[in-house]
Amino acid sequence: MSYFKNAINFLQTKYIFNIYVSFIIIYLLTFIGERSNFLFLSIQVVNIFLCILFINERPGLNLSTSFYTFTIIFLGIFPIAEFKMGVLYWGGKELSDFSYIIASILVLLSLIAFRLGYEVKLKSKSNKKIQYFKNPMTRIRSWLTLKTIVFLIFPCLYILAAYNYDVIALQFRGMGEELETVFIFEFFFIKPLIFNIIFFSLIVRKDSGIYNKIIILVSLIILIFFVNPLSIPRFLAFSLFVPLIFVLGKFYYKLNYSYINVIFFGMIFIFPLLDIFRWFKLEDNFDSTKNMNLDYFFAGHFDAFQNFARTIDLNFHSYGYQLSGVIFFFIPRAIWPSKPEGSGFLLAEKANLSFNNISMPLVSEFYLDFSYIGIFIGMFILGVIYRYLDRNMSKIGIIDNHKKIIMVIAYTEFCCLQFYLLRGNLLACTAFISSIMASVLLINYYFKIINLSLKQILNAIKY
């Protein structure tokens, strides 16, 4: 047992992270590919090691770690491999070395701007403690179970009706997406709502000492049945289940490398398997080796940097028009016919690509709107915002009241959603992430209102 514990502890240290990232970089730099450019590769290595340096200052599940890890993977490691292998996505024309170099320099600029913004110190209010969940009495236990069941009834019945009561289709994304009654609302609001209702109740039970193995088991069964990770998009499964594991397992408090290692492990082993269920049908023969090869990793899943380089190569700007679509994303196209499309669609049209639902990283969105100055100002503001949120959450202390529970759920899920937001496109990501955060907000108001009854119970049993 001690050997297993030591192995787990070792995997949480910075040494294993630094070792395998350094090994990947050395391998990519030394293998003989179709293309090579010393300046581009050098800048890429600088970008990666800057991210490693910043991560080592404060690892853990936080927004800055998500930002730097995204940059390492999507804008650092994969661009090197794609460049040296001559990989081109979506039938686009070959990009010059100059376009890659400029894109790499602008990624470096975005890192510097983000870091400068992250160093800005803002005053933050101390978290006021409110209503504790620290009384494992029978009446409180009954209150939590009853209110959770009542809250779950409508979304669970709704999702069953949306899936035409086909419980098999409910378990697999490929089958669910074939149903005309299942679309964005079901994936990005109802399922996260069901998940977070149960997430909230499990945190209350764990932190208040209200243990009932049968209720906890039933809660997890309901959670998996309605929000099976095989039935939802990969980024959503990552953004829901990783916070659940980290918060309930109390890894969230620890400033170690478990979050980063989960990301790398998931990208290499878990995401390829989940991608199979994107198109999976019962009549299909399941092949676990289908995506476990290099072809999967260069099939367009990591096209962010190359799309950024294409934006630079085409040298076109919207001067804030694309950003206006993001700010007013909630206005339907029926009211605003000229509402901008996602920037990925715009780039695909300009570059005559064979596929238009492509990623557009945040750094490219800023460049598309306001060129170089847009990258610097945009990333600086992003750094300021991330610093403010990270700083406030680092002082939250023990999760012991309603407000903190909601804050932790929203924050940890938002940290994981950064990989989707930073990859883009921004318009779609803003709409989907807002929907997921709205489910947390609804839970906040529901439990805040009914918490008045808990307060009355606590006052009634004082002695």
Image: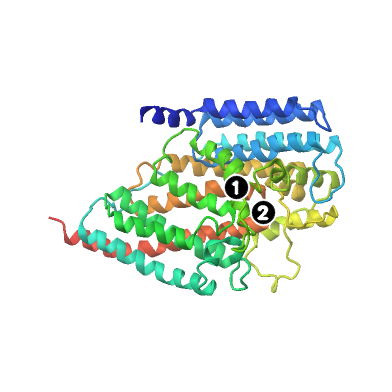
Mark 2–mark 1 distance (CA, rounded to whole Å): 22 Å
Looking at the image, do the residues carrying marks 2 and 1 touch, with CB atoms under 8 Å apart? no
Q: Which residue position is annotated with label 2?
A: 426
Place of residue 169 in the rendered image (x, y in percent of width and height, measured from the top left) = 55, 66
First in sequence, mark 2 or 1: give its number: 1
SS at mark 1 in the image: helix
- Name the residue at 73% across, 53% down: 358
The circle drawn on residue 271 is: 1
Place of residue 255 in the rendered image (x, y in percent of width and height, measured from the top left) = 46, 33
Give the crowd class for mark 2: few <14, some 14-19, many >=20 residues within 10 Å: many
Of the pair 224 and 236, the residue shown nearer to us: 224
Work out whether residue 106 can be spotted.
Answer: no
Of the pair 350 and 4, the residue shown nearer to us: 4
- Name the residue at 46% across, 62% down: 225
The quarter of the displayed image where residue 112 is located: top right
Give the crowd class for mark 1: few <14, some 14-19, many >=20 residues within 10 Å: some
Of the pair 267 and 255, the residue shown nearer to us: 267
For badge 1, the amino acid type reads Phe
Work out whether residue 8 can be spotted.
Answer: yes
The quarter of the displayed image where residue 179 is located: bottom right
387 displayed left or right of 1: right
In the rendered image, the vertical position of residue 356 relative to residue 113, given as above or below: below
- Name the residue at 40% across, 67% down: 152
SS at mark 2 in the image: helix
Foreground mark, 2 or 1, reads: 1
For badge 2, the amino acid type reads Leu
Of the pair 328 and 95, the residue shown nearer to us: 95
Place of residue 256 in the rendered image (x, y in percent of width and height, measured from the top left) = 47, 32
- Name the residue at 50% across, 44% down: 389
